[in-house]
Amino acid sequence: MVRLLTEVIPLFQCSHEFSWPRRLPTGDYYQVCLRCGAEYGYDWTTMRRTERVHRGTAVQTRAHSNRKSGWKPRARRLAVELPLRFRVEGASEWTEGVVRNISHSGVLFQGISGLEHNTRLELIFEMPEAISGQAESQVLCQGRVIRTIQSGNEEQPPSVAVALAGYEFLHQRKLPRTAETNVR
């Protein structure tokens, strides 16, 4: 049996950094390593990657599936409490907030009021290891406000739901520093 060098020598194996889970028309999810391109199934119920799928299998499955479903269940949320910095796209000031939950469709965080529907935001926070495959992975996300939920308590800031359009790992980029970026 022929084995690849990467299977024999662990030193050469990729320390995966995974994309946000992607959904196939069949309803299944998968993730792609941003470094090596390996594809793995993803189970939102257990919040874990499953078996590795052969390169291109997920894309081929997507191309061959014409199944359409009218009903889509609400995305499963991963409850977290993570510090967050965010700003309106193109602005220079960063504002602090707290991520309350993450799903495959976006992020819910507590922040400031006055963010209008469809406002484009940039967010920086630590992506949970269950999603990214990396511990302590700071990410820069782009997204848009889809909902603002006022809290019943005047002392608590409103919650903001953001649909994520994409993200990138910041370990290879210089992170914006709080002192240099005017955090409110």
Image (cartoon, rainbow, N blue to C red):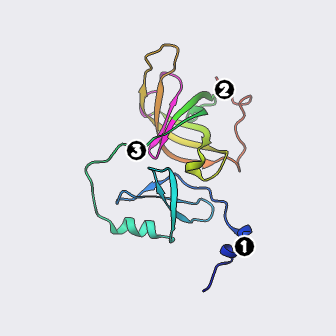
Residue found at the very far front of the displayed protein = 46
Residue 51: x and y in percent read 51, 65
Residue at mark 1:
9
What's under tag 2, amino acid-wise?
Val
Q: Is residue 110 magenta?
A: yes
Residue at mark 3:
75
Dot 1: within a 10 Å radius of its alpha carbon, few (fewer than 14), some, or many (20 or more) residues?
few
Q: Is residue 34 left or right of residue 73?
A: right
What stretch of residues is rendered in magenta? 101-118
Q: Is residue 99 magenta?
A: no
Dot 2: within a 10 Å radius of its alpha carbon, few (fewer than 14), some, or many (20 or more) residues?
some
Residue at x 62%, y 41% (from the top left corner): 126
Identify the disc placed on residue 183: 2
Q: Is residue 122 above or below residue 24?
A: above
Residue at x 41%, y 70% (from the top left corner): 60
Q: Quadrant of residue 75?
A: top left
Residue found at the very far left of the displayed protein = 70
